[in-house]
């Protein structure tokens, strides 16, 4: 985190992005992506400084970790990775998915939130990101349900 008078605020140059000679939807997507790119560094610094979850005047509460075990697997699931897209933009879940990632992987900000196996390399106008394979046929963002009008390939 930057050591300045404004604390943990991060800045994105709105004027510079909006003055570019590109369509408005692309400007909005670039601005959202720029703002989201500041979050991982800020989150990591917050975790390193152990600032997350500290409250004054309240009793200490332990936060439970997310579930790590799949209790019941529906019949018909196979070991084949499937990402079939329907006309609604919904991507079917990965079949025979492994249990959610363990403690060290939970904060992994670079892994696709759909398949949990590929790196994020595609950003949508809303700012959310997936891998190119999972995001190529989506009509709506699986995280916020906004219509996808812009895709930006990340390298």
Image: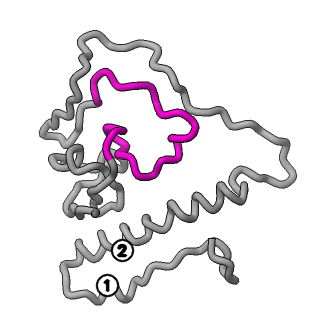
Magenta part of the chain: 94-118
The numbered disc on residue 26 is none
Q: Which residue is mark 2?
A: 31
Q: Position of residue 48 (x, y in %)?
A: 67, 57
Q: Residue at x 36, y 50 (%)?
A: 144
Image colouring: one colour
Q: Is residue 77 above or below residue 47?
A: above
Position in image of residue 137 (x %, y %)? 15, 46
- Asked if disc 1 and disc 2 are in contact, CB closer than 8 Å, the reply is yes
Q: Residue at x 31, y 73 (%)?
A: 30
Reply above or below: 33 against 147. below
Instruction: Residue 99: say if magenta.
Output: yes
Question: What is the C-alpha distance between the residues marked 1 and 2?
Answer: 8 Å
Q: Nearer the viewer, residue 120 or 28?
A: 120
The residue singled out by tag 1 in the image is 18
Task: Name the quadrant containing residue 87.
Answer: top left
Q: What secondary structure is marked by label 1?
A: helix
Residue positioned 51% across, 79% down in the render: 11
């Amino acid at each position: 985190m930057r050591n300045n008078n404004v604390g943990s605020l991060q800045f994105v140059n709105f004027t510079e992005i909006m003055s570019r000679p590109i369509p408005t939807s692309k400007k909005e997507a670039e601005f959202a992506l720029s703002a989201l790119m500041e979050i991982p560094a800020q989150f990591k610094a917050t975790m390193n400084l152990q600032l997350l979850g500290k409250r004054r005047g309240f009793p200490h509460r332990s936060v439970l970790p997310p579930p790590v075990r799949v209790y019941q697997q529906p019949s018909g699931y196979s070991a084949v990775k499937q990402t079939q897209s329907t006309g609604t933009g919904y991507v079917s879940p990965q079949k025979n998915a492994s249990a959610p990632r363990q403690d060290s992987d939970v904060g992994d900000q670079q892994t696709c939130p759909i398949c949990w196996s590929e790196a994020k390399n595609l950003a949508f106008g809303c700012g959310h990101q997936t891998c190119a394979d999972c995001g190529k046929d989506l009509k709506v963002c699986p995280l916020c349900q906004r219509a996808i009008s812009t895709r930006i390939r990340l390298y």
